[in-house]
């Protein structure tokens, strides 16, 4: 069984949508089983619906990138429930106070 990357699956789905072919015709042309195409379509539909629900709930996808931080200036706040918040120490006192209040309310 061939493992396809997310990009390959997206290319297949986009190709299918743009082809105007039936599922059987497109699958045959691409050399994949119809059931595989159906699986990809169903998975894409579920993920798209989950993204819509998350956006409606106020969640947004973010990409985190670590900036160069001096290890001696790492700040770690460990909450009672075991959650951890780690950051470079760049807080103004008032901001740190707000962070702690929010964290304690969780």
Image (cartoon, grey):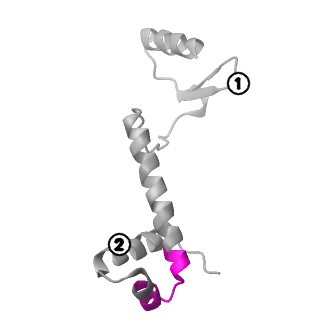
Q: Is 85 rendered above or below residue 61?
A: above
Identified at 49% across, 75% down, the residue is 37
Q: Is residue 61 visible in this depiction of the protein? A: no
Identified at 50% across, 42% down, the residue is 66
Instruction: Give the Cα separation between the discs numbered 2 and 1.
Output: 43 Å
Q: Nearer the viewer, residue 74 or 84?
A: 84
The quadrant of the picture occupied by the N terminus is bottom right
Q: Is 32 rendered above or below residue 85?
A: below
Q: Position of residue 16 (x, y in %)?
A: 36, 77
Q: Is 79 rendered above or below residue 11?
A: above
Q: Is residue 32 magenta?
A: yes
How many C-alpha atoms fall within 10 Å of the one at disc 2: few (<14), some, or many (≥20)? few
Residue 14's disc is: 2
How many C-alpha atoms fall within 10 Å of the one at disc 1: few (<14), some, or many (≥20)? few
The stretch in magenta equals: 26-37
Identified at 47% across, 44% down, the residue is 65
Q: Nearer the viewer, mark 2 or mark 1?
A: 2
Q: Position of residue 5 (x, y in %)?
A: 52, 71
The quadrant of the picture occupied by the C terminus is top right
Q: Are marks 2 and 1 in contact (CB under 8 Å)?
A: no
Q: Is residue 87 magenta?
A: no
Q: Position of residue 26 (x, y in %)?
A: 40, 85
Residue at the disc numbered 1: 82
Occupied quadrant, residue 86 = top right
């Amino acid at each position: 069984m061939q493992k396809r990357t997310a990009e390959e699956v997206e290319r297949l789905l986009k190709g299918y949508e743009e082809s105007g072919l039936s599922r059987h015709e497109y699958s045959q042309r691409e050399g994949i089983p119809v059931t595989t195409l159906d699986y990809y379509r169903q998975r894409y539909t579920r993920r798209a619906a989950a993204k819509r629900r998350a956006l409606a709930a106020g969640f947004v996808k973010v990409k985190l990138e670590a900036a160069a931080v001096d290890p001696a200036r790492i700040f770690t706040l460990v909450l009672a429930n075991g959650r951890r918040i780690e950051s470079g120490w760049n807080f103004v006192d008032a901001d740190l106070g707000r962070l702690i209040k929010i964290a304690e309310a969780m």
